[in-house]
Image (tube, helix red, strand yellow):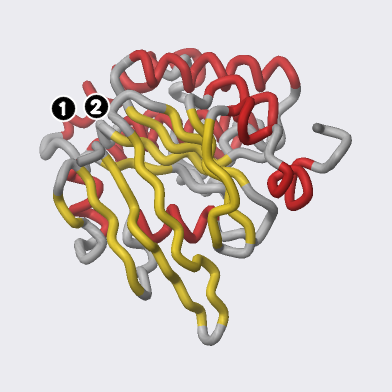
């Protein structure tokens, strides 16, 4: 059995099928890219994995255990962390305190939470701004803080939802380096991203969806050459 897999996930909102039969699997240590047009069901898939939304049908399996009926906090405790496309830090708290708050999902004392947060902030390259209020950070800093908060939950599997959106070329390179560093640290990653340079650079495999259904899966090169992916998402200019 795969390290992580989703089987025939379906999610209806009223009469609309936002996700309709998506299946994929991820091996330990792998980076899987999840791509598709806006509204194709990518974030809804993440929401079902993390129990923000319950699947209408289908299964989510992590290390041999079905988790789609568990509450969000138990899924986090099992080792699945995530970021959100729209970052919402605790704006009137410092960077460090934001990460401390996330660390309490793993530890019980203030001292342990602070130690874990300091370690995470350093790992994510945010030590110079650890005492800065989160609301004062530019978009790149907020995106990095979102990753730091997720990493403070000590995930074995990390779901990254458009962590590179809004970044300039220099910031993009730094984001790619951090994602690679996270994988090198032993964390498996599923990433949603619209910036093709990012997704094609870091992914071992890519799973493409459109209208809530799988249209292709394979290596970045294979998916980039797929006719359905080109027509639905990449466009002929990219091809």
- Residue at the left extreme, as displayed: 108
Q: Can you tell which mark lies on residue 114?
A: 2
Residue shown at the point (62%, 59%) measured from the top left: 40
Q: Quadrant of the C terminus?
A: top right
- Residue at the right extreme, as displayed: 237
Q: Are marks 1 and 2 in contact (CB under 8 Å)?
A: yes
Quarter where residue 31 is shown: top left
Q: 183 left or right of 115?
A: right
Q: Secondary structure at mark 2?
A: helix
Q: 204 left or right of 78?
A: right
Residue 129, compared with residue 147, is above or below; it is above
Separation (CA) of disc 1 from disc 2: 5 Å
Q: Can you tell which mark lies on residue 111?
A: 1
Q: Position of residue 166 (x, y in %)?
A: 71, 36
Q: Secondary structure at mark 1?
A: helix
Q: Position of residue 110 (x, y in %)?
A: 17, 33
Q: Position of residue 59 (x, y in %)?
A: 28, 61
């Amino acid at each position: 059995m795969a390290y992580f897999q989703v089987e025939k996930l379906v999610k209806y909102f009223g009469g609309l099928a936002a996700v309709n039969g998506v299946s994929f699997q991820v091996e330990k240590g792998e980076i899987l890219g999840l791509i598709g047009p806006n509204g194709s069901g990518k974030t809804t898939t993440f929401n079902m994995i993390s129990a923000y939304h319950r699947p209408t049908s289908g299964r989510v399996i992590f290390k041999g255990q079905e988790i789609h009926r568990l509450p969000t906090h138990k899924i986090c405790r099992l080792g699945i962390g995530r970021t959100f496309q729209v970052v919402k830090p605790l704006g009137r708290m410092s960077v460090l305190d934001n990460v401390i708050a996330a660390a309490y999902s793993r530890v019980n004392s203030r001292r342990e939470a602070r130690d874990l947060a300091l370690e995470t902030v350093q790992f994510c390259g945010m030590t110079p701004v650890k005492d800065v209020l989160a609301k004062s950070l530019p978009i790149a800093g907020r995106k990095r803080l979102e990753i730091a908060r997720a990493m403070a939950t000590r995930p074995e599997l990390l779901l990254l939802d458009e962590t590179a959106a809004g970044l300039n070329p220099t910031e993009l390179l730094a984001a790619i380096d951090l994602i690679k560093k996270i994988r090198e640290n032993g964390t498996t990653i599923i990433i949603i991203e619209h910036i093709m340079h990012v997704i094609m650079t870091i992914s071992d495999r890519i799973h493409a969806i459109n209208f809530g259904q799988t249209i292709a899966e394979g290596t970045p090169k294979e998916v980039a050459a797929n006719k359905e992916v080109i027509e639905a998402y990449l466009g002929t200019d990219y091809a």
